[in-house]
């Protein structure tokens, strides 16, 4: 069987990516999580979508506002005095998309990577035709690659306590 090995303590058969022996519970030192192209691709897509959004934000919020002023841009868009707040939220969404993409590449936090992928979908106003497919693809790939992410400390403690209950 390809991709399988045996526990050094009890000899139970398991996959090479197993971190803890399901039979005896020993922590396996050589176990490594398999990294697939899915999570890497999702991270890159989220970063690209977020970068497009940040570039768009700089173009609109800086160049156009400097030329016409906040009030003229606000009147043009029908947002009036709330344009700075809207621009700040828009920038935050784009930054979350980039940060989520980086987190996906590092496989640290599945929730933040998923949030970044969702934000990637909404990170552009003018290039919606490009960012929506990028964001949707990133969401799907992050969902498919969920098992590649590190577990949080709470989840590890829960698994360890479950294992101890089974043994004792």
Image (tube, grey):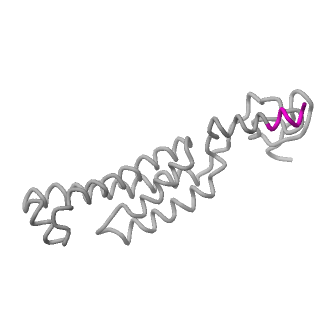
Q: Which residue is at the front of the view, 55 or 152?
A: 152
Q: Is residue 109 above or below residue 127?
A: above
- Residue 12: image location, x then y, percent: 91, 37
Q: Is residue 78 above or below residue 140?
A: below
- Residue 47: image location, x then y, percent: 41, 52
Q: Which residue is at the front of the view, 95 or 4?
A: 95
Q: Is residue 87 above or below residue 77?
A: above
- Residue 101: image location, x then y, percent: 46, 49
Q: Residue at x 24, y 56 (%)?
A: 85
Q: Is residue 6 left or right of residue 129?
A: right
Q: Residue at x 19, y 71 (%)?
A: 77
Q: Residue at x 57, y 58 (%)?
A: 141
Q: Quadrant of residue 22?
A: top right
Any magenta on residue 167? yes
Q: Quadrant of the C terminus?
A: top right
- Residue 155: image location, x then y, percent: 68, 40
Q: Which residue is at the front of the view, 67 or 157?
A: 157
Magenta span: chief secondary structure: helix
Q: Is residue 4 left or right of residue 29?
A: right
Q: Is residue 165 left or right of residue 83?
A: right
Q: Is residue 84 left or right of residue 165?
A: left
Any magenta on residue 23? no
Q: Residue furthest front?
A: 81
Labels in figure, total:
0
Q: Residue at x 31, y 56 (%)?
A: 89
Please report the bounds of the magenta region as a residue range.
162-168
Q: Quadrant of residue 7?
A: top right
């Amino acid at each position: 069987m390809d991709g399988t090995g045996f526990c050094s303590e009890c000899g139970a058969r398991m996959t090479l990516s197993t971190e803890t022996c399901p039979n005896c519970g020993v922590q396996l030192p050589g176990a490594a999580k398999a990294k697939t192209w899915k999570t890497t691709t999702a991270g890159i897509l989220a970063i690209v979508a977020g970068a497009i959004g940040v570039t768009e934000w700089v173009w609109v919020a800086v160049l156009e506002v400097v030329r016409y002023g906040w009030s003229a841009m606000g009147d043009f868009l029908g947002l009036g005095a709330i344009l700075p707040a809207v621009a700040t939220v828009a920038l935050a969404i784009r930054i979350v998309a980039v940060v989520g993409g980086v987190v996906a590449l590092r496989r640290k936090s599945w929730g933040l990577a998923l949030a970044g992928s969702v934000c990637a979908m909404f990170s552009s106003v003018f290039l919606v035709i490009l960012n929506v497919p990028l964001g949707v693809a990133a969401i799907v790939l992050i969902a498919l690659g969920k098992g590649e992410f590190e577990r949080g400390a709470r989840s590890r403690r829960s698994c360890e306590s479950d294992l101890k209950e089974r043994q004792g």
